[in-house]
Amino acid sequence: MSDRANDRVNDSDISRRRLLSTAGAAGAAGAAGLALGGAGGAAAYAASAEDPTALTTVGSTAIAFHGEHQAGITTPLQARGHLIAFDLAPGAGRKEAAALMRRWSALASELMAGRAVGNGEGGGGGNGEGGGDTGVALDAGPSSLTVTFGFGRTFFDRTALVAQRPPGLDPLPPFSSDHLDAKRSNGDLWVQIGADDALVAFHALRAIQRAAGDAARVRWQMNGFNRSPGATGKPMTARNLMGQIDGTRNPKPSEPDFDKRIFVPSAAEFPWLAGGSYAVVRRIRMLLDDWEKLPLKKQERVIGRRKSDGAPLTGGSETTELALDQTGPDGKLVVPDNAHARIAAPEQNGGAALLRRPFSFHDGIAADGTLDAGLLFVCWQADPLRGFVPVQRKLDRGDALSPFIRHEASGLYAAPGGPKEGEYVGQRLLES
């Protein structure tokens, strides 16, 4: 499935990696090894299924930048995330976009390896003793950092590459739960940053922003978080801010049709996208004041799963299949016909698969006095018109969860396949 590239960080590159001074911690770090996030696939997923990593070793894990697929798609969820969209600056076109992607790719490769960056951070210049490096993440390891790049629909207009724009980037249809803010939606370029350390994630965010220079301007930025590795006694599926286990039905790389459902095949009409994927990004506000007033049993009926362990209301464990036809003593369906889990189930949507990779967010109190918090929903698929769109249409028609959420921003991006050694992300498009 991939070349399983091992980008082990050179021990001499310790300018930002003074890791784990004790012998015991060093031994644990050696055992942790590398997570092959850039190469993707089963190895990356397995990293989330092993014994939890001790917090003292979290910083030592590096993800490969080069590989068949970009890192940050099958990589296990990280504790901290930043999503940021850019628009190319007025007058910037294909030449400037290629230079920017070359610059960003070189920067991401260094950052993900845990190395300090020099003047390669670009347009903003240096500030601090580290040359171009801000020094924010000095002494930290790579901390499972990933930097993932995608192109929005308008990118192809700006670079005169409309003939290379795939139909998968056709605009998403409107949904009744949409309350979209155009200023926080879409964008020519999209960057997803994830890491298991907040300073490492911020360091990468700042470096990417500065390296944009005069070529691109920030359109919007959103910041999120997940549970930290090692915070639970055993590996667990993440919970969202409603307290629900979120991501139980995610497709797994071990499944025989995983690649077909998540990644664009090499025989695709647009060769530059081979090995890539489409990301749908939605800022979903959770109306927690209303949700938290519901009794536990009503919350569980809205979702169709127990809150305690994520198991279906029809019984079993988190991974037990929903018994969608099971009825109770009253003759009614145990999993209500409008329960979120029922409507979103792949078997209810022609097998449509979404690889969910979200972050939670909390941006304080909104102007109306309510909590501004929820989910930065990111899902990956080989074709959003066969993945996200039909599932969301069904949810839009009768999901019991709809009264408790509000979709406030939206974006759709095509993420090219991973770069080979010596390549930059998007090179096969921009130099075609």
Image (cartoon, grey):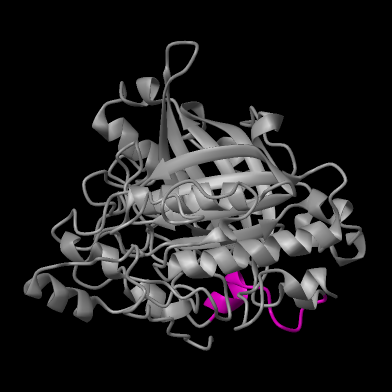
Residue 72 within the magenta-colored segment of the rendering: no
Name the spot of residue 281 as percent of width and height, x first.
Answer: 59, 47
Q: Looking at the image, which is closer to me, 38 or 366?
A: 38
Is 320 above or below relative to 218? Answer: below
Q: Residue at x 65, y 71 (%)?
A: 276
Q: Residue at x 33, y 56 (%)?
A: 138
Is 369 above or below relative to 289? Answer: above
The C terminus - image quarter: bottom right
Residue 263 within the magenta-colored segment of the rendering: yes
- Residue 144 visible here: yes
- Residue 343 visible here: no
Name the spot of residue 269 as percent of width and height, x first.
Answer: 82, 76
Q: Is residue 108 left or right of residue 189?
A: left
Q: Looking at the image, which is closer to me, 174 or 88?
A: 88
Q: Which residues are magenta?
A: 257-269
Is 119 above or below relative to 244? Answer: below
The N terminus - image quarter: bottom right
Q: Residue at x 36, y 65 (%)?
A: 142
Q: Residue at x 68, y 67 (%)?
A: 102
Name the spot of residue 8 as percent of width and height, x first.
Answer: 38, 81
Name the spot of residue 290 as percent of width and height, x first.
Answer: 38, 21
Most frequent secondary structure within the magenta stretch:
loop
Quarter residue 58 falls in? bottom left
Q: Looking at the image, which is closer to me, 270 or 420?
A: 420
Q: Is residue 374 left or right of residue 229?
A: right
Is 201 above or below relative to 336? Answer: below
Q: Is residue 241 left or right of residue 3?
A: left
Quarter residue 282 falls in? top right
